Amino acid sequence: MGGYESSFLPDAPALLREVLWKRGFRSNDEATRFLYPSLSAIPSPLESLKDLPEAISLLLKARDTKDLVVIFGDYDVDGTTSTVLLYTVFKEWKLNVDFFIPHRVNEGYGVTLKAAKKLLKEKPETKLIVTCDCGVASFEGIEFLRSQNISVIVTDHHEVPSTRVNANAVLNPKQKDCHYPDKKLAGVGVAFLLVIGLRRALDLKDFSLSSWLDLVAVGTVCDVAELTGANRIFVRLGLQKLQTTERQGFKVMLRNQGLEGNVLKSRDLGFVIGPRLNAAGRIGEPTLGVNALLAKTEAEAYEYVSVLEKHNTERRELQASQMKEALEIAEKKLRATPHLKTIVIADPTFHLGIVGLLAARIAENFKRPACVLTELQDEHALADFEGRSGIWKGSLRTPPGHHLSEALAAIRIRSPELLLSGGGHALAAGVAISYKDLSLFEAEFEHAISHQVKIHIPTIVDARLGSPSKLQEVISLLEPFGNGNPPPLLLVEDFKLDRVQLMKDIHLKLHGTHHAAAWSVLHFKSPWVKLFSPYAVSMNRDLKIDFLAELSENEWMGNKRIELVLKDLLEMRVSGKRFEIQRPNEISESQSSREAGRHSYSDSTQS
């Protein structure tokens, strides 16, 4: 494959040069900044982030007058880490600060009217509210707060409505007249920009910004933000900080999973820390995650984390039972209407805390946008929808190629009264509709998606697998992997299969050689178990395969080993004769997840 110029990173391993060149890097300076992230390379928000001066002015005034500042967070990981970040920083910098997290069911997402009223009832001395990971579309709640002479600073990263919310300051790089260059920050990244601005205003040069990067890394990864630009810097440096973090909550979570002191990867944030913090907002008390990360002692942190572990176990059990039901409903619906480009399912028994996870799996399995709704029946949950007796509320997810936020905007134009609430990102969003409007919503969602021009995202092979030398160095330099920066996808040809290992009858591990080097190739929940099963019993024929695989570093008992993760089986030859491969439908699932460049470990916002 090759193709890179001889002057491009001449001292780097060939595979690294090829991968970077294939991903669009052309200058040595640009590539070096990518490979060796530095906090100083983050674009300064001081001159370019819209409304930052107004936000700083309000915070400085509150600091001088000792007015109560309340951090209004969200109940997901991004919102939790944003809340802890701002609460910790403000407290350390002598502001009078408290926090408030709305309940997913009782108050709903964002600064709803009910949440705003509850906040002021619980904290009547409040003078300034700073939102985290929400607020850009919270018109009614913020209007109420302003009517009560409360100042509001919004920090958010969701898609911005055409009408500006009536806050004193709105920090969101996605605003059309905001010139901050990095538009793909998570909510915690936007909150961190506010910290940068306040630090400059207070001239606190002795306070190291890196102290809070563990929080920024966790929120960024778990919100599935693209790991490019500033986000890559946040996560690369934040992973390093997390290894020596003083936050007792993180330490207990990592210790419980045997990861304390380990070199951490982005997947550890997504699969270990993320689900536990998310469990608080899904089926537990939403402040649990914040309290766990604010805990001063190990004993206090252990107490909070133990409850989070309990809720996470409950969430997994609930998810397993309702996932089976949701997939069966979706499959039955598609059999009846195979022409539909969307799937909408509504069931009053689904738990509101996991509808986003259900929608994500349906979208992934059936390769089309999906919406999963549950009925709000609790009187507290319905309080925010005055005059309405039945509400469907839920989450939307889509494979890459469609844009959910734009679809909701199109629905609002055609049916202005249909959506009681709604908003989000390209790949994840949330909605609420009246019970009677379910059929209309299904039709409008189908129409909106059908009229979008689907963006085809091709599978890009980074390089051919060659010599195994320096692969650990290549992986180390390219990490962290995730959305926007997947592991290198390699073409492997003439792989001689020596042994087939079946694991739990659903996973494959292929052992063989390539260019005289021994390799193991993993494929979890493999659709090719049946194809390879005979060779698990006897390998008495010359068998070679061609396939696409991602590079992966496996660490066990302190020993690191490079493995391949199978992504697509291309060709199989038995004694030199081409063997016909029956291509399973499931292969497109692995392709689509790579095309998204993301992990499905954490339900994104707006669910």
Image (tube, grey):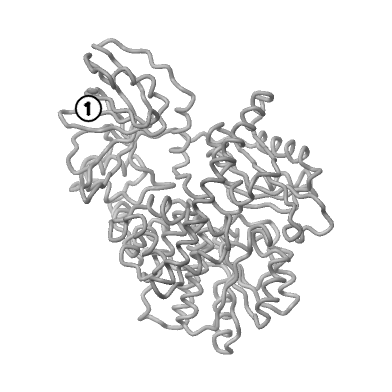
Question: Tag 1, which secondary structure?
Answer: strand
Residue at 31% across / 44% down in the picture?
A: 20
Query: Does residue 445 appear to the left or right of 582 in the view shown?
Result: right
280 vs 607, nearest the viewer: 280
Mark 1 residue crowding within 10 angstroms, few (<14) / some (14–19) / many (20+): some
Q: What residue type is labelled 1?
A: Gly
Vertical arrangement, residue 500 with respect to residue 473, above or below: above
Residue holding disc 1: 512
Residue 522: x %, y % from top left: 32, 33
Residue 180: x %, y % from top left: 50, 62
Query: Does residue 440 appear to the left or right of 456 in the view shown?
Result: right
Seen as rendered, the residue at the extreme left is 516
Seen as rendered, the residue at the extreme bottom is 65
Residue at 53% across / 45% down in the picture?
A: 317
Residue 108: x %, y % from top left: 67, 59
470 vs 581, nearest the viewer: 581
Q: How many circles with numbers are drawn on the protein? A: 1
Q: Quadrant of residue 286?
A: bottom right
Residue at 54% across / 39% down in the picture?
A: 361
Q: Quadrant of the N terminus?
A: top left
Vertical arrangement, residue 163 with respect to residue 17, above or below: below
Residue 564: x %, y % from top left: 29, 35
570 vs 294, nearest the viewer: 294
Seen as rendered, the residue at the extreme right is 387
Q: In which quarter of the image is residue 576?
A: top left
Residue at 61% across / 36% down in the picture?
A: 325
